[in-house]
Image: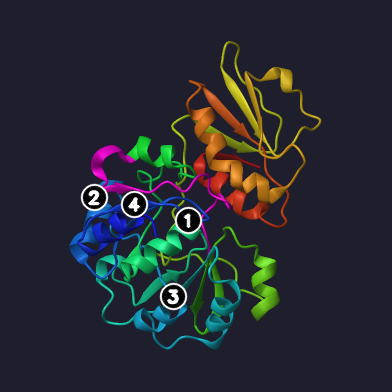
């Protein structure tokens, strides 16, 4: 175990905050059972307290310490996909602070796959509440420098783990009226989940978020973004970028910048590159980013979900 991980683990145990890598995006972590520490996470992010957090577990055994009345299908998913980019929303135990769950009777939990995250959680020996390490509604960080540029010295400790492998947040599944329900598209394809436990109920319309990342405006660059499959007309002298999966029939010459998430059309690579590419475009001083939809297969729906929440959408 490295000295840095030991130091980060001590920061977490003592009530501090740590930015650390996961396979999805970088997280801003605090001791999940320490309400004062969790409150710092909300303060650093500027995150509203009605938005619940995901608790990252050091082991599968820790699931029963935070959740109860766990459906058998949830255990099947945990056994098959943990560690990995899947979050389960389950009935909480009384030890979980209201601040973590936004006062809901459920808690969102997952086990991250990134080796540094696993080492950190094992060294700390505690559950860690960790939303993405960004300012609220801004781009999620998939590299340490993205997190540091947004959160600066407000965080007690930063751990670098290189670029994130998956690149979009975890898929979230919960149980409503006893039925497994999709709560957020993410880094685990729906087909894989349904192959394990059968069909999921579609994302419901709820009066308040039951899971993180459910707000209509989220994951947005400072540059205005238009998410549309239609040909785009824009005025002269405007600096406009095109963001697409791969080269196609569109006239690239009409744009100031062109960015392809995967020249070969690999949706896993596209997801990995999504937030870092948006961050690069955001830094170019552009007037507009025009984003084209991804194919509705594999991780395509999750990428489209993030793009639709990042800006205006036209059919």
Disc 3 is placed on an element classified as loop
Q: Position of residue 252 (x, y in %)?
A: 73, 23
Residue carrying label 3: 59
Whole-number angstrom distance, CA of label 4 to CA of label 1: 16 Å
Main secondary structure of the magenta stretch: loop
What colouring method underlies this structural image? rainbow
Q: Which mark is first along the chain, 3 or 1?
A: 1
Q: Nearer the viewer, mark 2 or mark 4?
A: 4
Whole-number angstrom distance, CA of label 2 to CA of label 4: 25 Å
Q: Which mark is first along the chain, 2 or 3?
A: 2
Q: Which of the 4 quarters of the picture holds residue 181?
A: bottom right
Q: Nearer the viewer, mark 3 or mark 4?
A: 4
Disc 2 is placed on an element classified as helix
Q: Residues within 10 Å of mark 1 (few under 14, many from 20)?
A: many
Whole-number angstrom distance, CA of label 1 to CA of label 3: 15 Å
Residue carrying label 2: 43
Q: Which mark is first along the chain, 1 or 4?
A: 4
In this picture, residue 104 sits left or right of residue 248: left
Q: Which residues are magenta?
A: 151-171
Residue carrying label 1: 22
Residue carrying label 4: 4
Q: Residues within 10 Å of mark 3 (few under 14, many from 20)?
A: some
């Amino acid at each position: 175990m490295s000295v840095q991980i030991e130091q980060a683990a001590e920061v977490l145990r003592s009530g501090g905050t740590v930015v650390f890598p996961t396979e999805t995006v970088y997280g801003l972590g605090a001791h999940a059972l320490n309400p004062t520490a969790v409150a710092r996470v909300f303060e650093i992010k500027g995150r509203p307290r009605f938005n619940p957090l995901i608790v990252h577990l050091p082991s599968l055994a820790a699931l029963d310490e935070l959740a109860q009345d766990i459906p058998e299908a949830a255990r099947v998913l945990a056994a098959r996909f943990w560690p990995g980019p899947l979050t389960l929303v389950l009935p909480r135990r009384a030890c979980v602070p209201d601040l973590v769950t936004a006062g809901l009777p459920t808690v969102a939990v997952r086990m991250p796959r990134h080796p540094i995250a696993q080492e950190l959680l094992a060294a700390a020996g505690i559950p860690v509440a960790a939303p993405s390490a960004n300012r609220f509604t801004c781009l999620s960080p998939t590299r340490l420098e993205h997190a540091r540029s947004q959160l600066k010295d407000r965080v007690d400790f930063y751990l670098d783990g290189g670029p994130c492998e998956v690149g979009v947040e975890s898929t979230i599944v919960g149980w409503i009226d006893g039925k497994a329900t999709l709560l957020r598209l993410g880094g685990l394809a729906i087909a894989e989940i349904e192959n394990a436990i059968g069909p999921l109920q579609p994302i419901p319309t709820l009066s308040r978020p039951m899971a993180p990342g459910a707000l209509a405006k989220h994951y947005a660059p400072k540059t205005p973004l238009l998410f549309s499959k239609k040909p785009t007309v824009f005025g002269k002298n405007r600096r406009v970028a095109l963001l697409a999966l791969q080269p196609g029939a569109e006239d690239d010459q009409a744009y100031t910048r062109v960015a392809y998430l995967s020249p070969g059309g690999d949706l896993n690579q596209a997801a990995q590159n999504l937030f870092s590419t948006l961050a690069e475009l955001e830094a170019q001083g552009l007037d507009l980013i025009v984003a084209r939809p991804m194919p509705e297969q594999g991780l395509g729906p999750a990428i489209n979900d993030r793009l639709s929440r990042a800006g205006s959408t036209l059919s």
